[in-house]
Image (spheres, helix red, strand yellow):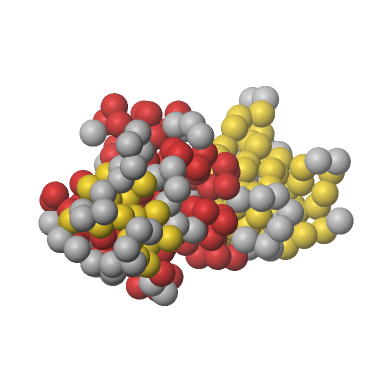
Amino acid sequence: MNLTVSGIVLKVSQSGDSDRFCTILTDSHGVISAFAKGAKSMKNKNSTATAQFVYGHFELYRRRDYYIMDESQYEELYTGLREDILRLSAAQYLCQLTMELVPEEQPAAGFLQLMRAALWYLSENSRPMQLVKAAAEMRMLSISGYMPDLVMCRECGAYEHDLMYFIPATGQITCDKCGVKGGEYAIKLGRGAMTAMRHSVYADLKKLFAFSLQDESLKQFSDAAEAFAISKLEKSLTTLEFLHTMM
C-alpha cells in the first residue's frame, strides 16, 4: 500500500551503518514507523527530511508492520532547537509524550498542528520554554481524552478565587474556601496560573501560546501541567527526567 503523508519526525534510530528508522507523527495515520535506506549519508535524497524534529512530506509504502520511505521533502527544520539545550530537551520530551499518547493508524491532524506550533515557539525562543511545554502538555492530554474540568470548583461551583487548587489525579479544581480532601495531592494556583490552565485547554489552537506569565504564576502553571501528565501516564518519561537535570 502506497501512502503520502505530512508529518514530524519524532525519533530517529540508526539501522546498520547507513540506514535510519524513523518514528513519524502524521496527519492521517497517527504515529507510524518508517525505514529510510541510506538516509544516514548526507548525499542520500532522504537525509535531511529524516532528522529528528523535521516537518515534511513523505511518500511511503507498507512492508509488514512498518513503512519503507521512497521519497521525502522537508518543509521546516526548527534549527533554533539546537542552539539551546533546554529548548532541545523540552522538544525531545514533547516528542516522547506524543509517542505515548497518539494512536497508530488513526487521523491525528490536531496533534500534528499542536506539535508544529510547539516546536516553532521553542525553536524561535519567543516564549519561555516552561510556558510552551506546559501549554502543550495540557492541550495534548486534553485531545487525548484526558481533558480536565477547570470550569468551576467541584464543591461550591465558584469560578474564580485569588487561590485555587488543582488536583492532578482527577483533573478538577477547588477554591481556597472549600480546600481539598485529606490525602489528596493538590497544586496551588493563583489567578494568573489558573487563567493559563484554562487557556491551555479551552483556547483556539492558533492562540494557544499567545500569553505571558510572571515567574511565580509560570512555575505554578508548569508544575500543575507536568503533574497532570505524570498522573495520566502513570510514569515519568526519561526525556522529562533528563530535562530536569538541565534546569
The residue shown at (77%, 60%) is 3
Q: Position of residue 124 (x, y in %)?
A: 29, 58
Q: Please tell me in which quadrant of the rendered image residue 6 appears.
A: bottom right
Q: Please tell me in which quadrant of the rendered image residue 195 appears.
A: bottom left
Of residues 95 and 172, the one drawn nearer to the viewer in this rendering = 172
Q: Is residue 75 visible?
A: no
Q: Position of residue 88 (x, y in %)?
A: 35, 42
How many marks on residues?
Answer: 0
Q: Is residue 127 above or below residue 246?
A: below
Q: Is residue 206 above or below residue 112?
A: below
Of residues 178 and 119, the one drawn nearer to the viewer in this rendering = 178
Q: Position of residue 9 (x, y in %)?
A: 56, 48
Image quarter where the N terminus lies is bottom right
Of residues 73 and 115, the one drawn nearer to the viewer in this rendering = 115
Q: Is residue 84 above or below residue 16?
A: below
Q: Position of residue 14 (x, y in %)?
A: 61, 30
The residue shown at (34%, 67%) is 157
Image quarter where the C terminus lies is top left
Q: Is residue 12 visible?
A: yes
Asked if residue 185 lies left or right of residue 217, the reply is right
The residue shown at (77%, 42%) is 66
